[in-house]
Amino acid sequence: MIPFNIPPRVPKCSEYVLEAIENAKICGDGAFTKRCHAELEAMTGVRKALLTTSGTSALELGALLMNLQPGDEVIMPSFTFSSTANAIALRGAEIVFVDVEPDTMNMDVECVRAAITPKTKAIVPVHYAGVCCDMDELQKICDEHGLMMMEDAAQAVGSFYKGRPAGSMSDVGCFSFHETKNLSMGEGGAVLLNDPALIERAEIIREKGTDRSRFYRGQVDKYTWVDIGSSFLPSELNAAYLLAQLEEHEHINGRRMERWNQYHEAFAALESEGHLKRMTIPAHCTHNAHMYYILLNSLEERTVLISHLKQNGVSAVFHYIPLHSAEAGLKFGRFHGEDRYTTSQSERLLRLPMYYGLSEEEAQHVIDSVFSFFHK
């Protein structure tokens, strides 16, 4: 069976984890965490990167930094994971879901513009499949209305928009290092920041609301509870595992891109025959080969293809029941405008196996299995 995903691992992962154990400091913010911060800052050009326990907690920390309050409205796509919405709902703000573009599955800028009200406090774009949203237009909207922006770049580590790294183009950028992502620490994430005021508060929130970081830098003679916060620090074991991959991130993403290109070139024929639609990558985006998906012609066809692939030893999956139609989505948010594409596209989208260790031969078997479904 070719699985949908195998978590990435490079030789130094084991070496670094053992070193972390032998250092006898396995709680957060040790040497490996600091080295991860430095790697992420070098990759993205941000002033400060801070590891978190998950991509979810990165979003929750970001929502705290945006100082969201009950009565505020936050705009995001309905086609995203629950973590994006939970971060907003936990602050008591109302979620305003908008439609996506059919080509990229990213939030439609014009739908965002139409959803602005006097209560709007922030926008949360999601870089789906590692393909960046139209950040120039979204920033214009934020500037026009005095809004904050938090990038959900969970899937976009190593992606770029017009040469600018994903996660670096807003008030708060959020990464995920879950085992399904290009780079993994099992469970983990990061916040990316440039504003000195947000950096200082993020350090406090991340350290259970204390000014412990300032104490260790010698800025205060003792540390104490100064703000709300939680324990957002991952262990040194997780950081050590991640560091080895950060040091080889270009190689890892390069291997994934080889398989992505293999899929994309092979499925051009099926697209020309009208059997499916391939991923679309705008010219101004450089993606990270986080996933390869195809769009089928109907929900029924997707269901049968999944079964066919399973019979041929291939695990393929779909995801994201649109949040505006979910029980919690109806409770904590509302959909603005017309659902032209979110639901219809989500019902036809199918993700194929994609991971660092996927071989050319295995990818070819996936391709052959898809072709055999249409060319019976």
Image (cartoon, helix red, strand yellow):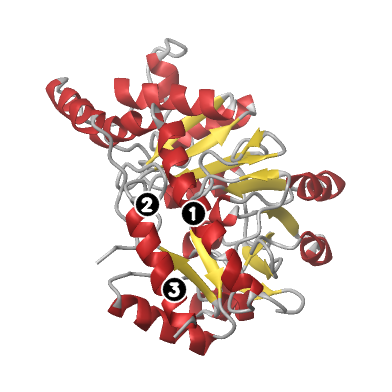
| Pointer 3 or 1: first along the chain | 1
How many labels were placed on the picture?
A: 3
Left or right: residue 313 versus residue 321 is left
Circle 2/circle 1 CB separation < 8 Å:
yes
> Measured along the vertical axis of the image, is residue 104 above or below residue 164?
below
* Residue 360, numbered circle: 2
Name the residue carrying label 3.
370
Q: Amino acid at mark 1?
A: Gln
* Residue 262, numbered circle: 1
Q: CA distance from mark 2 to mark 1?
A: 8 Å
Q: Amino acid at mark 3?
A: Val
Q: Position of residue 333 (x, y in %)?
A: 62, 72
Q: CA distance from mark 3 to mark 1?
A: 13 Å
Q: Position of residue 50 (x, y in %)?
A: 46, 32
Q: Circle 2 sits in a helix, a strand or a loop, which is it?
A: helix
Q: Is residue 90 visible?
A: no
Q: Nearer the viewer, residue 130 or 289?
A: 289
Left or right: residue 314 versus residue 237 is right
> Measured along the vertical axis of the image, is residue 276 above or below residue 90?
below
Q: Position of residue 245 (x, y in %)?
A: 35, 33
Q: Quadrant of residue 5?
A: bottom left
Q: Quadrant of residue 365?
A: bottom left
Q: Amino acid at mark 2?
A: Glu
Q: Nearer the viewer, residue 174 or 301?
A: 301
Residue at x-position 59% and y-position 76%:
324
Q: CA distance from mark 3 to mark 2?
A: 15 Å
Residue at x-position 44% and y-position 46%:
256
Q: Circle 3 sits in a helix, a strand or a loop, which is it?
A: helix
